[in-house]
Amino acid sequence: MAKKGDWVQIHNIVLPPEERSGSLPEDTKANPLEMWVKGYLVNDAEIGEEAEVITRTGRHAKGVVVKVDPYFEHNFGFFIPEVLEIGNTVRKITFGGED
Amino acid sequence: MDNSYDAIMARKNEIIKSAVGMDFDRFEKPGIGFDYEAMMAATGYTLDEIRRVQSMFSIGNTPLIELKNLTELARKCAPEGKGARIFIKDEASNPSGSFKARRACTSVYQAKKLGYKGVVTATSGNYGAAVACCAAMAGLKCIVVQECYDSKGIGQPEIIEKARKCEALGAEVVQLSVGPELFSTVLQLLEETGYFNASLYTPFGIAGVETLGYEIAEQFRARFSKDPDVVVCTNAGGGNLTGTARGLRKAGCKAKVVAASVNLSGLHMASDSQFNKKSFTTGHTGFGVPYSVNPDHSDVPRSAARPLRYMDRYVTVTQGSVFYITECLASLEGLEKGPAGNTSLAAAFRLAQDMDREQCIVVQETEYTGAGKHINPQLSFARQNGIDIHFGDPKDEIPGKNIILPAHPSLIQVTDLDLDHMRRSRIKRAVGTHKDELTEDDIRFLVEETNTNEEFVLNAIASL
């Protein structure tokens, strides 16, 4: 249960597939146009339930609650050995070997 | 009110008119053309005034850094006596972390002056952060609309980082799945909020970038008592190149202007399944080519970004080459920057090898880097999405299939796009379905649009 005043992310369908613009590739057209917005819950709501939020600019928006206290998880990715190798290669060419 | 896609699009012109505070109709001419310079002048600001406004926002006067070690590396790859000095304009030191601060500033200032309570912008890139940053300084509200996720809900790490930054700067971020209908969402938000449309493509935005070109000429002359020989601009929507080139011209600088884009040919920009196969979300040919030949399909009736008017050459580089040069910049120059802005650096690294040692080539931007928006997470994301990453010859790179990191820096190449072909496409687009005989004014417009001459335009028309 998310409480009134909680910071949540909501989701809704802007355009179902049949209402999408005509000039789209088939793979895009087969899917709806979806939207995600964050805001403060106006009333208590369950995750998965339609609810209203007030966004950072003070707009009222409606959608299905998908996350409570949403946060960012992007990072610097996994180890990519090639990145080290590039650095080693160009330093050697530019500045010479370690000796 | 009817908020179906068709109904919103039908209200487009009136929404834009009240959301930019500018009537674009008054620049239209009989026939196919419009008065571009009158539209640019309609901002009401001179270049000096824009510089003053930008300095109020602590924007501009970014360092021009000579990349001595990268120049040395280029010379080791070049024939004897070749290898121009490479310089970079460190635009990442602007408040929002990119040159886009210049572009956002004038719009936000204008919105504040005209009494708008907030600004809306459609962008998945650095421009959102720039608008959010300037809006924060001006005390305006800000909504950034971005295309972010594919239908599986997987977001491009680079775009998610922009969302984070916009939120950090106080903006509301509206995230959408893949599709060009984003524009109708923007229109709906403009209508709902009554905010200013801080579009990337208004004269305010482009006039803001002119200061970048002007500064390059000034800084160069102050330090070396001469102009640079070549200025390379990463090209996507065309505003970066247009604004920079106009600024160079206003300074009387004769440097050649080269456009550079990452080659993403073969990938469809509106494709859901290919959305996360791209390792660059901007600075690529998927925007660069269509916006050059058809600048007026943006979110304003006439775009102020018209790069074909200004480019002397247009080259592409591979994704792997840009990642490679980004790592070179960190390893050899101690400058850790975001990859997309380094598209022009990869091109400059190769172009310098054809130039004499005493010549100078300027890369006119860097951009900030951070989680998601960095060579490592972008390569990591590509690998997770099944893109084959290996060392080899960049000419074997196939966008969406592999990323080939050059086995040696001498393998970094540029590929020239056929500018005359693009110019003919521009003419074809501009003439479109126009039935009447073209007037002298029309021809003059096409000459300006394509930076050519009457003979070229007449030949192109004859072959339509």
Image (cartoon, coloured by chain):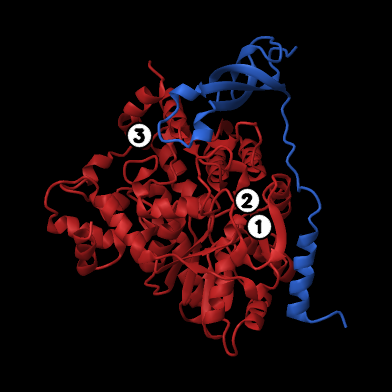
Task: In this rendered view, identify the residue nearer to me: B268 or B228.
Answer: B268
Q: Chain of mark 3?
A: B
| Residue, disc 1 | B403
User: Which-is-in-front pick, marks 2 and 1?
Assistant: 1
Q: Amino acid at mark 1?
A: Ile
Looking at marks 2 and 1 on the same chain, the residue that comes earlier in the sequence is marked by 2
| Residue, disc 3 | B16
**Disc ID at residue B261:** none
Q: Chain of mark 2?
A: B
The crowding category of the residue bearing disc 1, from other C-alpha atoms within 10 Å (few below 14, some 14 to 19, many at least 20), is many
Q: Are marks 2 and 1 in contact (CB under 8 Å)?
A: yes
Q: How many marks?
A: 3
Task: In this rendered view, identify the residue nearer to me: B16 or A88.
Answer: A88
- In the figure, what tint was chain B given? red
**Disc ID at residue B279:** 2
Residue with the most extreme right position: A99
Question: Can see residue B429?
Answer: yes
Q: Chain of mark 1?
A: B
